[in-house]
Amino acid sequence: MTLVAILDVIVVVVLCASVVLRGFERTLPVAAFLLILFPDASQLHLAGLFDLTTQRVLVSVLLVLYVFSGRKARKGSASGKLPLKYLVLAQVAWMIVSTANSAVFTISFKAVLSQLFDYYLPFYIFAKSISEVKTVRNILLAFVAAMFVCSLFGAMEAYRGWSILSIFPATTNHFSNLVNAVADRGTRVQATFGHPILFGGALAIAIPLALYLVTTAKSWLGKTFLWSAVVLMFVDIYKTGSRGPWMALAFSLLALLVLGQGQLKKQVAVIGLLAVTVLVARPGVWETIYNDYVATNSSGTAQGESYQWRYALYGIAFQHLNADPARALWGYGPESFFYLGWKGDFQGKIVPFESCDSSIVQLMVETGYIGLLLVMAIFLKSVIKTYQHFRRMPKPSNSLCLVLLINICAFLFLMTNVAIFGWGQQTYMLWVIIALAMIYPGLVQTEQVVQEQATLAPAAFQHSFARSSRS
């Protein structure tokens, strides 16, 4: 508890000092770095109220600084409308409807407040506070830097057997019921994340970001850091032993290879060649991956049971929702799945459904089909708009749109087989990335107009001066 309190104080001091010395907008990358760095276990338990995580302290301070500094700095600047405003408001409103009819009202009420404060508030602050393309890139660099530090912790966990989470108070989370399954699959690193699969998911998002940032790095020192981060993150995502993130990263790199351009495409090709080289030089790596594939298709293994469990979740969700039209509309209430006490058939046995390894199923059960459709509408609009920006923007500025688009799609893919949405550091990353994807094209356009005006102004002055001289 003392350690967490000290970390909270450090976060407050760092954010306040950064705003005083550098301004609010330049503090956003610092906030992004800290949001990803700290684990959920860094929390103070306030009995009867809520858990005060370091991220919540950070968001609280960021809100105060935004009100007293950020809004003033942005006053008069064309920040534009809040992206996805009506869809987000509709989704929040439906969560409230679902909570009003919740099977566990108190739990759902706290969950809605958590969603609003933990994720929608940072989404709002980041979307309304950025005025420069440089800030967007610095925020993405902060994400990569945070994942680099987490990967260092992951490497220590893999090769030294020491976990950074051991210094924090023990906590429970969505994956607490899967401890035995994790043990059956050997050592899997998780760094500061709640589970190895969450760490792997965040790495699958951070690696494409790092590859993009290499193309914009100006100094050899920056390029060296980014390539070092890429290599270390590849090691760690392998060590998470998480099939979903492996697939998400493979799909992301393939998309970059097909749709990318210039240096970005070349870097992905280099990564592919290096991967093939590693598989040839270290046959044990290929053997591990192949054995995981074989085990996934066997019902008698931990991997096979985990894979089949996803299908069982969909089955029991449809069974209960389709039997009750009201619950099919608004569900059983946010965060209610773990309190419903459902039992059903799994591999010929009646077992309790105590874990939900799919954010899609969880949204469906907890907020009904309408709640699921509203969240999917947010993702769909984000994907469509970002793809349109990628197609319409000039090269090479549109490369970042492609990377952000791939990130959003990778997260959506992971939601089908991982409880990755609505909690943890990776969800902070998601909402900030969505905000950046929505506002980035407008920032590029604004900077291009300013540059054109700056270029035309001297020419206009010279023309006017010449005319006055002749007269």
Image: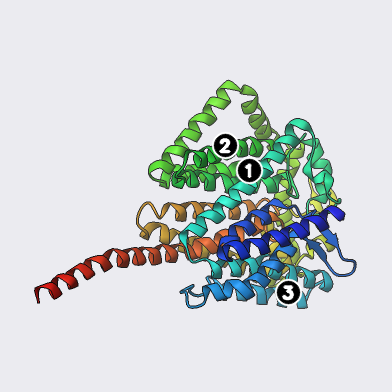
For marks 2 and 1, the one nearer the N-term is 1
Q: Height in image: 53 above or below 157?
A: below
Q: How far from the left and from the top, in percent, is residue 16?
A: 67, 64
Q: CA distance from mark 2 to mark 1?
A: 9 Å
Q: Is residue 375 visible?
A: yes
Q: Which amino acid type is shown beneath numbered disc 1?
A: Phe
* N-terminal-most mark, 2 or 3: 3
Closer to viewer: mark 2 or mark 3: 2
Return the residue at label 2: 228
In which quadrant is the C terminus drawn? bottom left
- Alpha carbon separation for disc pair 3 and 1: 39 Å
- Residue topped by disc 1: 148
Residue at position x 86%, y 51% in the image:
169
Q: Secondary structure at mark 3?
A: helix
In the foreground, 465 or 343: 465
Tag 1 or tag 3, which sits nearer the N-term?
A: 3
Q: Secondary structure at mark 2?
A: helix
403 displayed left or right of 446: right
**What residue do we see at 77% from left, 38% from top?**
302
Residue 232 sits in quarter:
top right
Q: Position of residue 94 (x, y in %)?
A: 67, 75
- Between the residue at mark 2 and the residue at mark 3, the CA separation in whole angstroms equals 46 Å
Residue 98, label in figure: 3
How crowded pointer 2 is (Cα within 10 Å; few <14, some 14-19, many 20+) is rated as some
Image x and y of residue 337, in percent: 78, 62
Rendered residue at 47%/45% (across/down) = 217
Q: State the residue at coordinates (23%, 70%).
A: 461
